[in-house]
Every structure is written in C-alpha cells, then in structure tokens.
Image: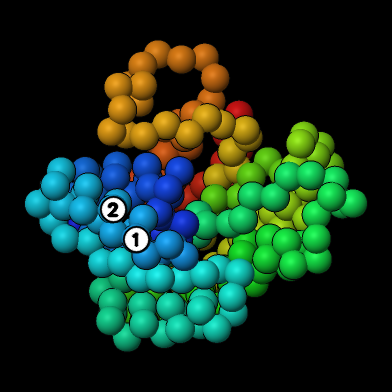
Amino acid sequence: MSISGRKFAITGASRGLGAALAIVMADRGARLVLLARDSRMLKGIADTIHARTGHSVDVQQCDLSNTESCAEAGRVLARDHADLDGLIHNGAMWLPGSLADIVDAEIQACISSAAIGSLILTRHVLPVLRARPFADIHTVVSTSGLANAPLSGTSIAFRAAKAAQDAMVHGLSEELKQTRIRVTAVYPGDFEDLSPLSEAWDAVRENLTNREVVDSILFTLDLPRNARVRALVVE
C-alpha cells in the first residue's frame, strides 16, 4: 500500500502534529482535506502545501468541541468527497492542570473534542468509507489513554478524553472488523513539536518529536491491506 493518490481528511490540521502530518503526506502524494477550528491557519497550511507540491488542498472549518460543527463538517465531507479513502482523527484539546484549576467549560470542551466530536464526524463519513474499495480510520490517541497511565502533567479531563478515544478505537475495530475499513491508532508519549519546513526536522536527536509520530502514522497507513496495527505505542 501507499498513500500516494489516496484522499485523507485530517482533523486538527492547522498546527503542530496535524500540520506536520499534512505537509509530509502531501509531499508523498496524498490528496487531502484539512479540518480545524481556525480557518486562517488552515489556509496557511494549504498554501504551504500548494507551494511545495503544486497541488490544491481542500480546507474545512470544524470545531471538534461543538457537536453541530462536527455534524456539518461530516455532512460536507460525505457530500463533496465521495472519493475519501481515510479519516485521521488528530485534533483534540490539550488541557493541563489540576481539577481545581480548570473550569467546567474546559472539561466539557476537552472530552467533547477528543471523543464526542470524533464519533459524530465518523458517523457522517462512514457511509462514504464503506463504499470505497478500501479505507482507513486512524486515531492519534496518547499514552494518557492507556490503562493505569500516570497523569504526567495532564489534567484528569484530558486523561478521561483520551481513555474515551481509546474506547472509540476498540469499538470501531469491533464494529467494522468484517468490512473493508481498517481501524488503527498510535499512542504517542510526550513529544516536541517540529515543523517539516525547518532544518531541525532532519536533525539527529534523542528526545521524541512529532516527526517520529508522523513516521509511525504513515507506517500504519502504508501496511498491506490485509494487515493492521490496531494500537502502536510510541515512546
């Protein structure tokens, strides 16, 4: 398998890991639909990809913490991208701090963005993916979503959100196991954000960065169709 020529939608694609993943996938010939809350930043990533590859990238505003925004984004994806080959759930709200230091709205937004929003988006896109000869649903979870994981500076809300995402991955794997949709996930530990546009991207380093996470995601997507890595922990 190769991602070249295949179309993927990526959430949280306006910055950080999502933007890096989008740039690298575009460099490798993937066709992309980029989703995020910030339309201006999304356009910047799309312009960067066009300048590097000459290919246009579709962008779509989607606030993962807002259920109606996710439903609308899913409806538009299903309507306008019948050739969609994969959905990559990367977007989620990072929320550090103790329970006493965060507010109710932050708790709700954190869990909604990681789990509820991703499920709603998936539900609307699922008929399109079912109709494809082969499709992928990939989720960037976190080691915070693993059983008995330490908080390590994150909040309880973030831990709960990623545990819910982990359950989503396993639930989708079970529900779709007799279909042509492959469900995979990576569980990265703490990593440093780099840009594929910087010299640091290719530098030798000891600490985990988003380059290794990008490479791990692409490893799961590049596997032959009859193989999958349901959960890949990256530390």
Query: Which quarter shows the C terminus?
Result: top right
Query: Pointer 1: what residue?
Result: 40
Quarter where residue 225 is shown: bottom left
- Which label is found at residue 233? none
Asked if one can make out residue 24 in the rendered structure from this viewpoint, the answer is yes
Is residue 42 rendered to the left or right of residue 157? left
**Three-letter code, disc 1:** Arg
What's the residue at 41%, 55% (across, down)?
13
Q: Are marks 2 and 1 in contact (CB under 8 Å)?
A: yes
Structural crowding at the residue carrying mark 2, measured as other residues with C-alpha within 10 Å and reported as few (<14), some (14–19) or many (≥20):
some
Residue at the extreme right of the image, as rendered: 100
Q: How is the image coloured?
A: rainbow
What's the residue at 77%, 34% (across, down)?
152
Residue at the extreme left of the image, as rendered: 54
**Three-letter code, disc 2:** Gly
Is residue 101 rendered to the left or right of residue 183? right
Query: Pointer 2: what residue?
Result: 44
Secondary element at tag 2: helix
Q: Is residue 99 above or below residue 132?
A: above
What's the residue at 47%, 57% (across, down)?
12
Q: Nearer the viewer, residue 184 or 158?
A: 158
